[in-house]
Amino acid sequence: MNKKTIISLLATVTLTSLAAVHAGETSKQGWIKENGSWYFYQNQKPVTKQWQGDYYLKKDGKMATNEWIYDIDYQAWYYLKGDGSYAYSTWQGDYYLNSNGKMAMAEWVYDNAYQAWYYLKGNGIYARSEWQKDYYLKSDGKMASSEWVEDVTVNAWYYLKGDGSYARNEWQGSYYLKQNGKMAVSEWIFDQNYDAWYYLKSDGNYAHDEEKDGRYLESDGKMRETEAEKAKRQFGNSPQTQQAEKKALEQAIQWLESEDSITINDAYVKYLMEYGSSDKGKTKENIEKLKSLSEELQKENKKDIGNISNTLLEKYNLRTMPEEVKQSLNLYAASLINSVRRQMKLSPVKVTETMVMISEKIAKEYINDGRFVSDGKGHDAHAINKVVEQYGLLTSGDNAKEKGNQYYENAISVDFQNKDYFKIRAEIRESILLFLLNNQEYDHAQSIAGVNFGKSYKDQYFGVGLGASGHFIFVDDSYIQKTGSLPFKTTEISQKVRTDYEQKVIQRLKEHLATLQ
């Protein structure tokens, strides 16, 4: 073999080798394992600092495993397991990964595995042996419910109800929970529901069939009182006190017997229609006119409705309120809204049994989620969508849901719990006035008034959720998309439900009025 042939063969081998190398480079596409680590290649280059399906590629291109990573795009922490996929709906030490893989922070989560609620603090660690507003997290992090807990930091016992909130101003067996939730010990308390004094001994049990501080406790624990003592305690002995009580009762009865309404004027109608129908109506000039008109209308709609004794009527909460009371209050709220819509020349809202139930369920889901309208997080879109989906109603997408966006709710920071019919009715009126005439924003006003952001509808259904926050729910006919697991019934509730129940309330007030001098 001569030198020329050898050089030719070497050139051939070299070119072949280079071609092989080049071929190897072009084949770098997709997932490739190198030096014990996985990489994902696109156009021969490793992907970095981004997701590839359920897997995360770090800044050096390596797939993350058994480690935490912070994604600046999603502004969230994730945990990547041994196989590289992100953890979700599970714990990693003291931290919880939500269903989307994000580490839970400053929020409540429900863990199906443990059948318990947990609160994850701002740093992501679950709360333990501490309070989160009205709720208590035990030493294992589980939210206490239907049980007693002792808070050693304040040396007091509390009772956490079925929904997790602490009991207050109520009995749990032989024990009394005060306004601050603490179990009463070695002290006198006055129970407004029973209109009586009780003495709670050092072990928390109420005293009975015995004398304490010169007063006798009956077998039911009530302090023995003469009729004269009771009258003095409730109303005082002076003619002035009696007259004030009579005036308040007469005002309350007159309000309940009259057809209540909310008054607006043509100018307010004009500017609110413009505001709600198009962006052109949201000018600074228009909004200033609405503010000025609102101030006038606030004065015009102010009504002296009386201030009756809080012992005259039974108190209710969301879970104990009789159906006739819920329906009556819903019909009253609708009547005020419709008085506004008549002046707007827009379609009225309709109250149905389905809407009363939807509104109640949403209010309960707020409580279950540990959410309040005043917590600064916006609407609880999770709670709202969870409920409406059952009835085949339109739901907002996941991204919108995360931002608190939804189609149905106007909510207000008014607590309707543990109040009587008269007080709840009065606060519904104040809530609607606040929606309409708050001098801050008019999105809620135009929704209540039926402008509906310029969107037309044939029928609109309404209900008010009487929970720890006020939930005013509107369902347009166009949102009834399909048949859900529960039927959406459009039959209206008869106004007779409201008139019949309110006659009972009026009669109770008149009976008490007759006892006054």
Image (cartoon, rainbow, N blue to C red):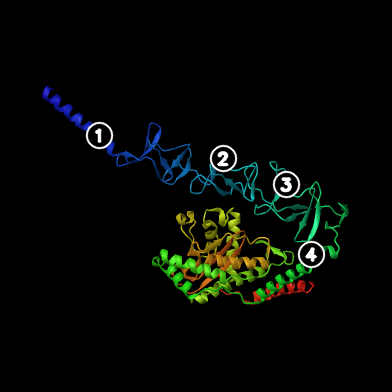
User: Could you tell me the amino acid type at mark 1?
Assistant: Ala
The span from disc 1 to disc 4 (Cα, nearest Å) is 105 Å
Q: CA distance from mark 1 to mark 3?
A: 78 Å
Judged by depth in the image, the label closer to the viewer, 1 or 2, is 2
Q: CA distance from mark 4 to mark 3?
A: 35 Å
Earlier sequence position, callout 2 versus callout 4 = 2
Whether residue 326 is visible, yes or no, is: yes
**What residue did someone put label 2 on?**
94
Q: Decide: is 26 above or below 12.
A: below
Tell me which label, 3 or 2, sits earlier in the chain.
2
Numbered mark located on residue 20 in the image:
1
Q: Nearer the viewer, residue 482 or 224?
A: 224
Q: Nearer the viewer, residue 373 or 56?
A: 373
Q: What is the CA distance from the residue labelled 3 to the residue labelled 2?
A: 27 Å
| Residue 283 on image: x %, y % | 40, 64
Write the residue at 28% across / 36% down: 24
Q: Residue furthest top?
A: 2
Q: Is residue 364 left or right of residue 148?
A: left
Question: Mark 4 vs mark 3: which is more N-terminal?
Answer: 3
Figure quadrant of the N terminus:
top left
Tag 4's secondary structure? loop
Tag 1 secondary structure: helix
The disc placed on residue 28 is: none
Upstream in the sequence, badge 1 or badge 4? 1
Q: Which residue is mark 3?
A: 157
Count neighbours of disc 1 (C-alpha within 10 A) and say few if under 14, some if 14 to 19, many if 20 or more: few
Q: Which residue is mark 4?
A: 236
